[in-house]
Structure formats: structure tokens, C-alpha cells
Amino acid sequence: MAGQYNNAGEYIAHHLVNLTYGRLPAGADLCYGGVNETSHWGLAGCSSEAASMGFIAFHIDSLMWAFGLGLLVMWLFRNAAKKANAGVPGKFQCAIEMVVEFVADTTKEVFHGKTGAIAPIALTVFVWVFMMNLMKLVPVDLIPFPLELMGVEYQKIAPTTDPNVTLGMAAFVLMLIIGFSFKVKGVGFLKELCLTPFHTWYLAPVNLVLELVGLLSKPISLGLRLFGNMFAGEVIFLLIATLFGAGLVFLPLAAGLQLAWSIFHILVIVLQAFIFMILTIVYLSMAHEEH
């Protein structure tokens, strides 16, 4: 809880650190003083150790929650498919059918051509991102605080507040863009990269640089947009949470702000999932089109 920390900054900084597993190099500063003598793999005990582990490290909490929510989505859809019937559908089946129909209709409107595998990809992206965003509505201390009492120092339960997750998903979208481009255009895709926008071979290096910058900017902006919105929302939730530890006078204000921001954030959660899905469809549609 916010009351057990020395100040609000310490509380917020603690809650923004991931549970990190990596190789702590020799010479790195340890959490409680001293220097690490031998390089070894393990969990970071504090933010400084996590930073010392560098790029080759794993955010255990983000991976666990992301994969767990993915499995939950597959289980929910599998149950809905098994219980589906031609008669009067139940509420759960209706909800799933509404989501599927919404994504299918959106894909048909945006994607020019046969949708094929595009609609299932869009459905997966939308539902998975929505579920990861939805974890933002869980009170910030409801899960991390009990785990901290059990010895798990850090725990971030909203995977989309981690840029590694959002940029990882965006990298997968980039692979889909390149894969579909080669599937549809073959070697013509390379020709497209080398002869656009200047249709002369002696400017091919310039064209290639310009096209690669444009190609790479799509997934980077896609991932950073989702991360930026979710991370900013998380910081505001943490700022509001600090008011609960500021005294009884601030409790009504904190409760009111928490409720108002949660209601507003429901729109943000759905909107960001929709934007990630719609841009994925747009980029894949562009991959199917000639310049």
C-alpha cells in the first residue's frame, strides 16, 4: 500500500518496475550495498539490479500475464464454440458472436480483397489487446501487495504498460506485413522497395532507405502508441492511489477520482484495442496493394 513507502515518488517508482529475470554482471551494484562479485542469472532484487541486467532480460510478470490472458481468451472462445447452438443463444454466446461479427464487418470494410486469414488475425489482436488493457482496471495494489508480502517484490499485471510487450506484438505485425507482401507480390515487393518513389534504378539506394524507414515506422508507432496511452493511464492510477495513503481527509477525493478515471479509462481500453486492430488491418491491406 502507499502508506508503507517514504514518499509518493518511491511508491510510484516501485510499482513501475517489472519482475525481471536476467544475468547480473560482475561489478554491478547490489540492492543492499556492495558489488556483485560473479556474473550470475537470477531475479532482480531492485530497480538498479534490473537496469544492470541490460537488454537480455525477461520481464516475468509481463510474460506470465500476457500468455495467461491469451490462454484465457482461447478457453473462453472454445467454450462458446462448444456450447453454440442454432436455437436461442445464451448471453455469453451472444457476447462472443457480437465481437466476432464486429471484427468481421470491420475487416470487410477496411481490407480490400478476400479477407481469408486477416479476420482471424484481427480478432486475435483485438481481443488479446483488450484483455491485457483490461487489467488496468484492477486496483493497483490488489495483486502486487499480497505478492510482496509473500516475497515477490515487483509485479506489473497490465502487460501493455510494458514496451517490450507492445513492441513485440508490433514486430509480429511487421513480420505479417513482409510475409503477405512477398506472398502477394513475390520479387515485385523488392522491386517496389527499390523503385518507389523515384522510378529510376540509379536512385534505388535512396528509395530503399526511404521505404525501409516507412516500413519500420509502422510497427514502431503502433507499439509505442499503445504503450504510451496505457503507461500514462497507469501513472495516473498510481497518483490517485497515493491519495489513499495521505490521510482520511483525502479519502473522498481519492475515491471520486478513482471512480471517474476508471470509467473514462474503460473507453481508452476499448479504443486502444480497436486502434491496434484497425491499423493492423490497414497495414496488411496495404501489403496486398500495388503502388
Image (spheres, rainbow, N blue to C red):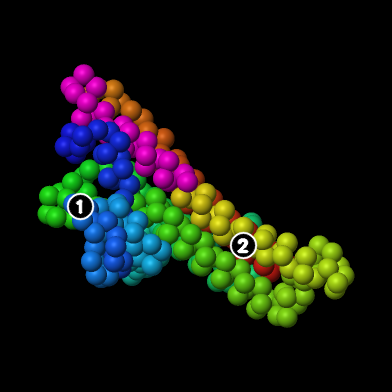
Membership of 238 in magenta stretch: yes
Label 1 crowding class (10 Å Cα cut-off): few <14, some 14-19, many 20+? few
Q: Is residue 46 left or right of residue 63?
A: left
Badge 2: residue crowd in 10 Å (few <14, some 14–19, many ≥20): few
Q: Secondary structure at mark 1?
A: loop
Q: Residue at x 67, y 61 (%)?
A: 213
Q: Position of residue 124 (x, y in %)?
A: 46, 63
User: What residue is drawn where x is 23% and y is 66%?
Assistant: 37
Outermost residue toward the left? 150
Q: Which quadrant of the figure has residue 284?
A: bottom right
- Relative height, residue 179 to residue 8 (above, below): below
Q: Distance from label 2 to label 1 (Cα)?
A: 42 Å
Residue 13 is situated, as x and y percent measured from the top left of the image, at 31, 43
Q: Using the rendered view, name the quadrant where residue 238 is placed.
A: top left
Question: Residue visible at 36% across and 30% down?
Answer: 260
Q: Which residue is mark 2?
A: 216
At label 1, which amino acid type do we have?
A: Gly
From the image, give the main secondary structure of the stretch colored magenta.
helix
The quadrant where residue 68 appears: bottom left
Q: Position of residue 180 (x, y in %)?
A: 62, 73
Residue stretch rendered in magenta on the structure: 228-250
> Does the image show residue 246?
yes
Say whether residue 102 is magenta.
Answer: no
Amino acid bearing label 2:
Leu
277, 160: nearer the viewer: 160
Kindly identify which residue carries mark 1: 33
Q: Earlier in the sequence, mark 2 or mark 1?
A: 1
Q: Which residue appears farthest toward the top when viewing the image?
A: 249
Q: Secondary structure at mark 2?
A: helix
- Horizontally, is 31 left or right of 78 in the view? left
